[in-house]
Amino acid sequence: MKNKPTFILLSIFIILSIVIAGVKILVSNTNNLYDDSGIIFIDQEIIDRITISNKSQSSQLYKVNNSWRIGKQGVFEPKLALFWNAVNNIQKSELVSVNPKNFNRIGLNENEGTLVQFFLQSTLQEEFLVGKWKPETKTCFIKKINLDQVFGFTCPYPDIFASNPDMWRNPIISNFPADELDAIRFSYPSEQFELNLTEKGWQLDNQDNINIDSYKIARFANTTQLLLADGFLNDSESKDIDFNQSDALITLVPKPKTPSRITRLRLKQIDEKRVAVKNGNIPIIYYISISKAREILLGKKDFILQE
C-alpha cells in the first residue's frame, strides 16, 4: 500500500505524456496542412465545387459522382489535370513580394485579379487571388486576400485559372481516326454524294470510272480526326439554331470491327464569321470559323482528280 501513491503518480505521468505527445502530433499534422503562403493543402478528393471569377466572368466547376462538370457539360480532363497540378505546386511556392506597391504590376488587384475558391458542399475551404502569368519564367502569382504577401509557383501554361467557362469545356467536336474511315457521306440542300473505301481505293457514289483525288480525302480525314471548336454557343444563341434545316450533314462511317461509331456532323452558318456545329445527340452547340468550315464543307467536284 505504501507504493500506491507512487503508482498513481507514475500512472498520471504516463497518461499526461501520452496526451502531450498526441497533442504534438495533432499540431504537427495540422501545421503540415499549410505552406509558407498560408494556403491550406487542397485535397482534390474532398473538394466538390470550385469557383473562378474576376470582374467580367465566372466559372463554376462542380463534382458529380467523381466527375467534374461545368454547366451541363463535362470538364475537359487535360485542362483539369493542369489545374490540379498547378494547385499542388502551390505547396512549393516562394515568397516574391511583401510590398503592396508591386501588387498591381503582377495583376493582384480588384480589377485584374482572379479569385479562386474551393468548397466542400456549401462550406468555403480555401480562397486566394491569382495575378498575371509570367511567360518568361512560367510563373503564377498568388496571395491570400487578407495578407500582403505574394508567392510565385510554377505554371507551365497561361489561363490555368481561367474565369472563362468556355476554357473548361471539351473543345473536341470530332476525333474520328483517319485509318478507321470506311465511308463519308455529304448531304447539302442541293447535292448529296458518298465516298466509299473499296479494295481498289476510294470511289465516288460507287462509280469505279471516276478518278478520286486521294490527297483531298486524306486532308479531309486529317481535319475530322481532330476537329476543334473555336467556341461554344450559349443557351440563348443555341435556341435560334434549327439543325433540322441545317446547311450540311456530314456522316463519317467506320470500318467494320473498329471501335469508332458513326459520327454525324450538322453545320449551319450563324453569321459571316461563324458556323454552328452539332455532333449527333451531344447537347453541345459548338462553333467554328468560316475558314475552318470550308475545310470540311466540300462538294463532289472537290474530290474528283483534275486531269
Image: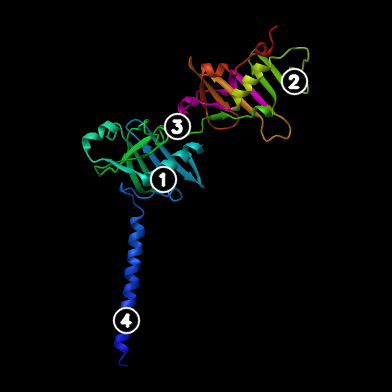
Pointer 1 and pointer 4: residues touching (CB < 8 Å)? no
Mark 1 and mark 3: span between their CA atoms?
20 Å
In the rendered view, tell whether residue 133 sits above or below residue 9: above
Relative image position of residue 136 (x, y in whole percent):
36, 30
Mark 1 and mark 4: span between their CA atoms?
46 Å
Image side of residue 107 versus residue 241, left or right = left
Give the mark nearest the N terminus, 4 or 2.
4
Relative image position of residue 290 (x, y in whole percent):
52, 16
Report the residue marked by disc 3: 167
Is residue 80 found inside the magenta-colored segment of the image?
no
Instruction: Give amino acid for label 2.
Output: Gly
Give the magenta-colored segment's residue range.
Answer: 226-252
Q: How many marks can you see?
A: 4
Q: Helix or strand or loop: what does disc 4 sit on? A: helix
Give the mark nearest the N terminus, 1 or 4.
4
Give the mark nearest the N terminus, 4 or 3.
4
